[in-house]
Image: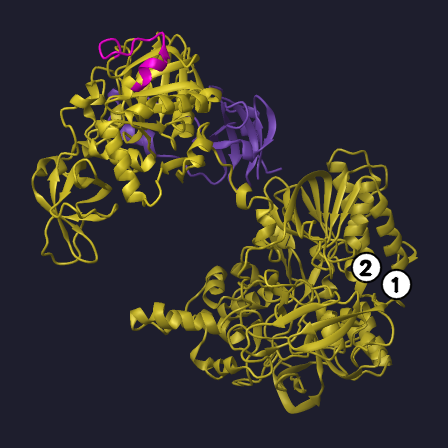
Chain colours: A yellow, B purple
Amino acid sequence: MSGTFRAPSGGRLDRSRPLHFRFDDRELTGFAGDTLASALLANGVHLLGRSFKYHRPRGVLGAGSEEPNALVTVRRDSARVTPNLRATQVELYDGLEAYSQNRWPSLGLDFGAVSGLLSPFIPAGFYYKTFMWPRQAWRRLYEPKIRAAAGLGRAPEQPDPDTYDNRFAHCDVLVVGAGPAGLAAAAAAAGSGARVILCDEQPEPGGSLLSDPSHSDAVIEGEPLDRWLASTVRMLASHPRVTLLTRTTAFGYFPHNLLGLNQRLSDHLGRPDRSQPRERQWQVRAKEVVLATGAIERPLVFPGNDRPGILLAAAARTYLNRYGALAGARAVLVTACDAAYQAALDLHRAGVSIEAIVDVRAGSADGALPEAARSAGLPIETQSTITGTSGRLRVRAVRVQKLDSSGVPAGPVRRIRCDLVLMSGGLTPSVHLFSQSRGKLAWDESLGAFLPAQAAERVRSAGACRGVFSLSAAVRDGTHAGLSAAQSAGLPVAASMPQLPPPESSAAGTLGVLPQPPGASAGKAFVDWQNDVTSRDLALAAREGFRSIEHVKRYTTTGMATDQGKTSNINALAIVARELDKAMPQVGLTTFRPPYTPVSFGSFAGFARGELFDPVRTTPMHDWAARNGAVFEDVGLWKRARYFPRPGEDMHAAVARECLAVRNHCGIFDGSTLGKIEVMGKDAATFMNRMYVNAWTSLAVGRCRYGILLRDDGFIYDDGVVARTADDRFHVTTTTGGAAGVLALMEDYRQTEWPDLNVWLTSTTEQWAVIAVQGPSARRVLEPLVDGIDISAAAMPHMSVSRGRICGVPMLLMRVSFTGELGFEVNVPADFGLAVWQAIHDAGRQHGITPYGTETMHVLRAEKGYIIIGQDTDGTVTPDDAGLSWTIGKSKPDFVGKRSLQRPAFASPYRKQLVGLLTRDAQHVLEEGAQVVPTRQRAAPEAAIGHVTSSYYSPSLGRSIALALVSAGRSRMGETLYVALPDGDIPVQVASPVFYDPQGSRLNG
Amino acid sequence: MLLIECPYCGVRPELEFVYGGQAHVARPGSPAECSDEQWVEFLYLRENSKGIHAERWRHTHGCGRFFNALRDTTNDHFLATYRVGETPPPAALERAAGPRP
């Protein structure tokens, strides 16, 4: 059956349900209720992985989420591979496949371990000091090699096939942690009428109670432990106001009492229902929060403290009492506190030989537990220390030495054979969430711990996480917290408030490195197991001048692993404090950040993946474009048709054909994505005058004008054609991407600067379908379809607007052009867009009408030197830079940005100005973004004088064209400049940005 | 995610709002009469206070209105929200000057 290290009885296992599992190439058996770690220990398997930096053999250190060592990859199928799971939290199921990490070729024989031999050359911060030269080698040689050698598990290579749920919840009281204090708090709060959510990271509620032996004679509220636990959990589970969430980690505490919970729904199941989500992320907004997050045992820092078989004392006790797994046969306990004696007593009772209890404290160890150990005949060595360990893949012996009266090891070294070392440096309260909530922590000297002090949120801590360790006090503390939380949440509390117990100073342990012989170098004493940081690394950092604990952390990487230093931070702090000769609070504590334990990306993504990642905006004519072979591009959330290739055409060919069709016949273009804002009201013209640079009062009803909008800093923010459709009404168009921002900017000025103006702004972007018909035949195409408007050149000149009907549908018709050709933009209600588009397309066949996309539109506008906001401007371009001074209403006293245009820097003759560039080789198309330099022969580095903003091949001109922003560009007409590219400089001539029809005669066709 | 009380709609989650920068920075009535220094101060210079900060928010995905708020930048707690054109409520400022809740 299962291995030889299974206790014959006891534990919270279902021994009638054996489970088969695989670890690397070994087939093993455990029981329902096991974790992977407990099942491995029960099979006598202690070697679980190789360490991050030195590839040292490692086993389990803890029994819960604090585990730094035992990281494994769990594989269900080729897509469901989860690396870096803590074996201590992986629940066993039948058929589980787990793999050790960071070893090659095998766990027992690992070639990477050679890096342990090189360790004198890879001290703290080695990557800052070595591998510096030659520079190229860092990227090509050193970094890839180091990354391959150091590391954790491999990320899965296929898309995650599972689904992840998310849920928002509100409650009066959220209790984090279902140990004795948390259970008591939840019961008290629920009993007072509060709506309660109680969450715990473990598969069942109980916390530390789950690790107490079934025969414990302790009582809570007069009941034996197991009865109290069972009845309390039953009450809470069936309580109508309580939501009890197990396998649910409160990973983050965010402002205004919002907590993130990660609930694991199916990872513990052998055959999960694939139609159900794998995890659920809760965002809980709580009126009051009770943190009952417990405490984590501190490891001791001594040479060789990382060998497999060296565990936290409480963890060994958990393995025995909760899982019936014996962590060894011959144990040595090293401790700095009384509580750990309980582990020795429990293991002794289970038949483990206790070879020695090494108590590092001076004095006679006369507390109740040491006395019990003494009467059980366990050998106790007080005032002693461990100076080293031996054993390759498992600890085999420890070296023990007495301390003299000044606390220095002296006298003979005793070697004690063992296969298990239990250690306890005392308890560190888990203040992670309290600290995340921006609560202040205070150093408690007598307890040797940071405790929650001033809260920043509506939160209280109860039990071990605030230093109240003893069972009865923790339960009383939890009840108090639950009642006071309910009261603060506004509920009438009838129950009498128990007295608040004080933190217990008797539980203090030790901090930092255990005493070692002077000058000794018996091996590495690990502080941070997961990142392989030793006490020597920390001391080195201090000697090298690091003073801030935040800097020491980053330099040595202590506390920066996936366990976030749950077992290492306080010891590291103590070592640095000692090196710097400062008190702990003066050195300070590094910041606690979410997540408490790693949370899968899937949980954060939730349903927002694939098609649901972002909304997609499509125009009324989208389906027509798709049916007609359009290639789409994303513009913000919009899908826009980029070009319409015919069979055999690439983009270049399709765009060339579309361009020529517009220039020679007629094109049809979907402009529906353009932003549209209706500006209405008695003061609409005044408002427009103040917002846009142009003069609007002089714009007659029925006319359009090209508008430029600046920010108050004087730089171009947006542009677009504005039509005056009535005295009190403007139809403002914006760029596709700028629509929301323009409306927000307008609203800002309307609401906060000029609230006296009678004007209303309405986004009408999605109300209109916009069909641009452009080209010499545009009028002939539209004429038969239009009712009620004379669209002749005389009646409807360039830049005019009129209301009428098309195909019987109401229409706003604008005669405008972004191509330089005779053109109209047909605006019809969005619901009629597709029908009108089809009608125009059908009517246009005889005139050679051709649908064109945004790529063609870009070429056509560039031929005319029309700018695109965000492509030819970048937030530092003024109207004059872009050659658009003519748009400014010169006599206006003010408009947004006007004052900035008078600033001295705006008048500099060296500002970058928009110009055209013509390559000497007419077929060479420049790269957009390429830098422009003045000379070919130059001493590098030389500052660029500009850059290419737009560049295309122009089919109409049969050559390449480019727009560029070039310093003093307009004074350089005809000059030869160079565009610097890796393959050599390209000579270009500065030209007007208007390449095609510079007189604009085609517009007036 | 913060909870923000829109003075027009009530308490809503931060998702519905857009931050609007420091409050009570009035645009000069006659920009043409500003010196370059005064104009630059209006454009660019803002408080960066540790503690109580008067700032603007817009309930973009709600009523669409701008309003003002007093927020403690050390813990993100709002002391008050109030309408455009109003001065900060004196009671909130007194609370801010006194000991923390």
Q: Residues within 10 Å of mark 1 (few under 14, many from 20)?
A: few
Q: Is residue A302 above or below residue A805?
A: below
Q: Amino acid at mark 2?
A: Leu
Viewer-closest of A528 and A283: A283
Q: Identify the magenta region.
A: A781-796
N-terminal-most mark, 2 or 1:
1
Q: What chain is tagged by disc 1?
A: A
Residue at the image position 23 percent from the left and 35 percent from the top: A862
Residue at the image position 73 percent from the left and 62 percent from the top: A270
* Residue A792 highlighted magenta (yes or no): yes
Quadrant (top left, top right, bottom left, bottom right) of the C terminus of chain A: top left
Q: Are marks 2 and 1 in contact (CB under 8 Å)?
A: yes
Residue at the image position 68 percent from the left and 79 percent from the top: A309
Residue at numbered disc 2: A471
Residue at the image position 49 percent from the left and 66 percent from the top: A557
Residue at numbered disc 1: A218
Q: Position of residue A379 (x, y in %)?
A: 79, 84
* Residue A767 highlighted magenta (yes or no): no
Q: Position of residue A798 (x, y in %)?
A: 24, 16
Residue A816 visible within the image: no
Instruction: Check the image and name the residue furthest to the left.
Output: A974
